[in-house]
Amino acid sequence: MSTNLDIRSDETAVFALGGMGEIGKNTYAIQVQDEIIVIDAGVKFPEDELLGIDYVIPDYSYLIANRDKVKALLITHGHEDHIGAIHFFLNAVNVPVYAGPLALALIRNKLDEHHLLGKVELHELSEDDVIKFDHMSVEFFRTTHSIPDTFGMSITTPAGVIVETGDFKFDLTPTTKQPPNLQKMARIGSEGVLLLMSDSTNAERDEFSKSEKWVGKTIDKLFDEIDGRIIFATFASNMSRVQMVTEAAIAHGRKISVFGRSMDNAVTNGRALGYLDIPEDMLVDAREINRLPDNEVLILSTGSQGEPMAALARIANGTHKQISIKPGDTVIFSSSPIPGNTQSVNRVINELEEAGADVIHGKVNNIHTSGHGGQEEQKLMLSLMKPKYFMPVHGEYRMLKVHAGLGEQVGVPEENIFVLDNGDVLALTADSARLADHIPAEDTYVDGNGIGDIGTAVLRDRQMLSQDGLVVVVATIDLKSQEITAGPDILSRGFIYMRESEELINEGRKEIFHALLTAMHEPGATEHSIRNAVISRLQRFLYEQTKRRPLILPMFIMI
């Protein structure tokens, strides 16, 4: 792979390794000559068809090939789709990391867990900081989101100013007491913005997103009405929501028990940084809650996305060690399912209902508001920044397209708007912009300890196994004498029940026998050619008989 982009020395390059055409995996880069800065290192959670995959992360091969040029990783905020891949990133390219207080605390937890904490240079950001590099400098402006310490970035390059908003909404009454810095945004815009890269998540919503304060009123009302135990599930990183529910619990005399490692870390960090005001005597150990009256209990839990190993899923299916559902419990889902998680969330809701809990979820109950701005806020950001060029980011393709249309509505010429894919390189000067190059930016799958060793062929095999099962063919073959000395035998797992399929198995063995003899007598026959012949013939036979395509695994002993 070439380590150089196809750009001129006077051009500034902008590209995404993740976040374009998808929700998650946000990783953006700006390159000026021999200097690269990277914004965010996000992860994407796998959709249902990615069987067995734990995470999806970007392809870092271009950055690895240019590791001497990469100067820093800058973090907009502490959500997983912006910091979740940071240990993978730093293992690939170890550079200084700059982040706000809460994001840095969450990053420290991750690095400690992966034995990287003492090996990485970490810097805490404030809104007033300016970071200077040889060819670029970066300043920050505060935005509002569903987590404290959320920043947009203004990067000054030789070509002009590039603004990356990070995730944002315009919440004028935020529970974090950190309102958006409209004055600074307007100042940056008035001084001139060459390119705006702006959050597209809610581009399809014709609205101005509701404030977190609106959700707080609903939470207070629910606490007034519910007599039994309350189990509240939300993103651990949604500090605003955690703050509101714990305030409501304290006001209603409910002790708070925290379930789930990520929620425990969030509460610990939130209290340490002053974002959560929870007196020590209001927190109780999970083992104590069964001794308290039901109307004095709040269980704060992870698992709002239906994750099978999260605390809420284990509570729902009866495998949690400390707690089980009982009649009178109320479970509140204070989040919306991430694309791909709807089925998992519905499964957990059904299990909770079957166990006897009342479940409150969905938009009609007013217990969630988005941390991303709707169309009106996206147009406001465009109007404040007044960019010459516009590049929608952070969204599925249709969202990027709608956001591009909003840019046209507020005066950005159509030819100055770029809807790009991961890996596309936009080359900028003060008065030009062009699509100049493309670098590798395919998904990298993480399965257990394996990074990038799971490809489409493996995923296809897993899909076949999940749908149609496995057939193992066993035989002993003397290739020299062209004889079958034992077998062939068939074993089935997840395809047919062998005791009730004797006729199919016998016919299948005959097909394999003929395929083996034919293949062995072919000139230059090898174990590989014989395997392929057996797979082809047996697949065809089994599909004719059952209309299913099991994965076929020949196991030959060659003598």
Image (cartoon, helix red, strand yellow):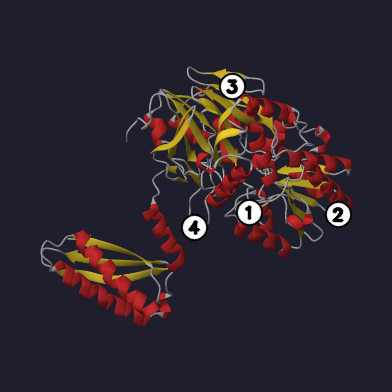
SS label for mark 2: loop
Rendered-image quadrant of the C terminus: bottom left
What's the residue at 41%, 44% (across, down)? Answer: 452
Mark 1 vs mark 3: in front: 3
SS label for mark 4: loop
- Rate crowding at label 2 as few (under 14), some (14 to 19) or many (20 or more) other CA atoms within 10 Å: few
Residue behind mark 4: 49
Q: Inspect the image, locate mark 4, and give the three-letter code of the amino acid beneath it.
A: Glu
SS label for mark 3: strand
Q: Inspect the image, locate mark 2, and give the three-letter code of the amino acid beneath it.
A: Ile
- The answer to the question of whether label 4 and label 2 lie on touching residues, with beta carbons closer than 8 A, is no
The percent position of residue 197, horizontal first and vertical second, equals 56, 36
Disc sitting over residue 226 in the figure? 2
Going from N to C along the chain, the mark reached first, 4 or 2, is 4
Q: How far apart are marks 1 and 3 (CA)?
A: 34 Å
The percent position of residue 371, horizontal first and vertical second, equals 69, 43
Q: Inspect the image, locate mark 3, and give the three-letter code of the amino acid beneath it.
A: His
Q: In this view, does 530 lie above or below 66?
A: below
The percent position of residue 305, horizontal first and vertical second, equals 64, 51
- In the rendered image, which quarter is residue 107 located in? top right
- Rate crowding at label 3 as few (under 14), some (14 to 19) or many (20 or more) other CA atoms within 10 Å: some
Going from N to C along the chain, the mark reached first, 1 or 2, is 2
Q: Does the rendering let one see residue 374?
A: no
Disc sitting over residue 232 in the figure? none
Residue behind mark 3: 123
SS label for mark 1: loop
Q: Inspect the image, locate mark 1, and give the three-letter code of the amino acid beneath it.
A: Gly
Q: How far apart are marks 1 and 2 (CA)?
A: 23 Å
Residue behind mark 1: 306
> Is residue 383 rendered to the left or right of residue 557?
right
Going from N to C along the chain, the mark reached first, 4 or 1, is 4
Q: Distance between the residues labelled 3 and 2?
A: 44 Å
